[in-house]
Image (cartoon, rainbow, N blue to C red):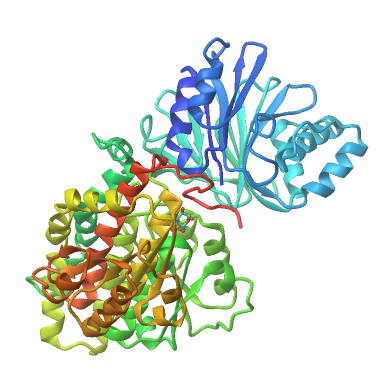
Amino acid sequence: MCGIVAYIGKKEAYPIIVKGLKRLEYRGYDSAGVALLHGNDLNLYKRQGKVANLEAFTEDKDRLGHAGIGHTRWATHGEPNDINAHPHYNEDRTMALIHNGIIENYDVLRTELIKLGYQFRSETDTEALVHLIDHIQKKENVSLAEAVRLALLNVVGAYAIVVISKENPNQLVAARKSSPLVVGIGKEDDFYLASDATPIIEYTNNVVYLEDEEIAVVDLQEGLKIFNINNQEKTPYVQQLEMELEALEKGGYEHFMLKEIHEQPRSINDCFRGRLNAQEGWVSLGGVKEYEQKMINAQRIVMIACGTSWHACLVGEYLFEDLARIVVEVEYASEFRYRNPIIGENDIVIAVSQSGETADTLAALELAKSKGATILGICNVVGSSISRITDAGSYTHAGPEIGVASTKAFTAQVTVLTLMALSLAHKKGTISESKYHTMLSELEAIPAKVSKVLESNALIEKIAEEYKNCSNALYLGRGSSFPVALEGALKLKEISYIHAEGYPAAEMKHGPIALIDEEMPVFVIATKGTSYEKVVSNIQEVKARKGKIIAIVTEGDVQVKAMADHIIEIPDTDEHLVPLLATIPLQLLSYHIAVMRGCNVDQPRNLAKSVTVE
Ligand code: G6P
């Protein structure tokens, strides 16, 4: 993972880099560091922990300079300490490098470089690269950019790098393969480089997303030049970003997660915009329209994802199968890619990813593409790698999600999948006209109903108070509420470090029931619908063993209310749309429990938002 930021121009680099690193902390926060070029000094400061530690450490140091690079780390090779933090110097400290990714053959490179007399200070894979560039530049007597290119020809793995050098004070050299990198073209003949556009947007809307195996040189005299690894010059494709700065701020909320939970009425609405009109009776996803017939004809659709996005796919499976009668298989991207999956030209693979950068999802898609499948994407981050390699796709339009635990991105993913399923079902004729129109209206009413659910915040906070000290929790649901149970359990695990498991309600009796005692809270999605009576029986089984029941029920429910320890009501809706509402109380519950336990809600330990390593 890791986040990288760099600047070169007329402004002071340090404040830009530090602000950018804070925006990228979601990518990792094990350590942070900067290297700044000031006159003839290349000053390098780095510290274990968050960017704030780095700031405190550098307070009395020389932080001046108009060119600099910065890094926030999610440790892979070498423990998170000051020495392993980036940037890394070359031997004579004339050059420094930041890296996001993994150099898989670093051991071989390291051994060779040690033989050549290089001394390694850290345990990182990255240090091998800076020494290799240094070695090539000296041996071949070539420019910095050429040395970077030649070095990268020897590298196996993933990288987004930026190199700064005393000998080239007017330029930065960057390159990427499998890890993202964006170049911002400033308004004052200056340049910004970052893992995503969030550190850049404040200064410029003009960006260039580097492609795999491209090397970018930003030079104060010569401007931006891009080459591929075979040394062919490329014309930079400049895009205009539409992101708003306020979307990156907390807007009065204590945490990004809370803000993002509360944004859901709007983010779901944004997801509908121009795609759904219940009054006129249509739904249309422009991005994938030309692939709809292919989806209908496909032998099956494979959905691939990781983490929360995988849960969204599971909801998608219920929707596609029930409404459009299309066979769907949901796969963990990491398993799919190494399983020699049977996949061919008649298959459609849909990748679902908030970041659009998850390494396993990206690799699984590439595999499917190589086997001839049509590949589609559902991503949140515009211009992300997945959105660029897919044949077509639909953005979720949830806006930037900063909290590491995914909330609004999940409901937006489910919304897009619902729109897709409805559109396909209508086209295929597997849904009656009346059901189709009712569902469109129900869907349009969802944002207002989400707002209603959010009004239960105070009640949910009280429930959180009661269970904040539990060590385990069970989440149960059936049908498309089963993925909601999985997602609820994941949210609790991720941010409050309480062990939690999600189960299909009926599976409880095949194992988890053994865990139930008076200490065990069981969160059940027990809304009205096909399996309601069955879930009621499951609740009774829990109560018979003195477990605590916290049930999410449809407004006005009496049966579950009579049995449960607590109920949280959600407005009535079509059964297919329940995940969009039932997820919200579980997000709030995890949030409050985590806050009460003193956890870092937005940046939980050991996690990162964008997992660009395997
Ligand atoms: C990480 C994040 C999760 C996310 C998962 C998949 O584990 O912490 O919140 O669900 O990656 O990420 P993606 O960007 O592909 O949806």
- Residue 9 appears in the figure: no
What residue is shown at x 59% (from left), y 80% (from top)? 341
Q: Quadrant of residue 67?
A: top right
- 554 vs 526, left or right, is left
Name the quadrant containing residue 82: top right
Q: Is residue 329 left or right of residue 44?
A: left
Q: Out of 444 and 536, give the one closest to the viewer.
A: 536
Drawn side of residue 567 relative to residue 220, left or right: left
User: Toward the viewer: 79 or 233?
Assistant: 79
Q: Position of residue 238 (x, y in %)?
A: 44, 43
Residue 358, given in percent of the width and then of the height, sits at 51, 57
Q: Is residue 397 above or below residue 166?
A: below
Quarter that holds the C terminus: bottom right
Residue 394 position by quadrant: bottom left
Q: Is residue 508 above or below residue 397?
A: below
The correct choice, above or below, for 80 with respect to 344 in the image is above
Q: Residue at x 29, y 73 (%)?
A: 543
Residue displayed at 42% across by 49% down = 495
Can residue 309 be seen here? The reply is yes
| Residue ID at (24%, 80%) | 536
Q: Is residue 608 above or below residue 352?
A: above
- Where residue 79 appears, as percent x and y from the top left, is 67, 40
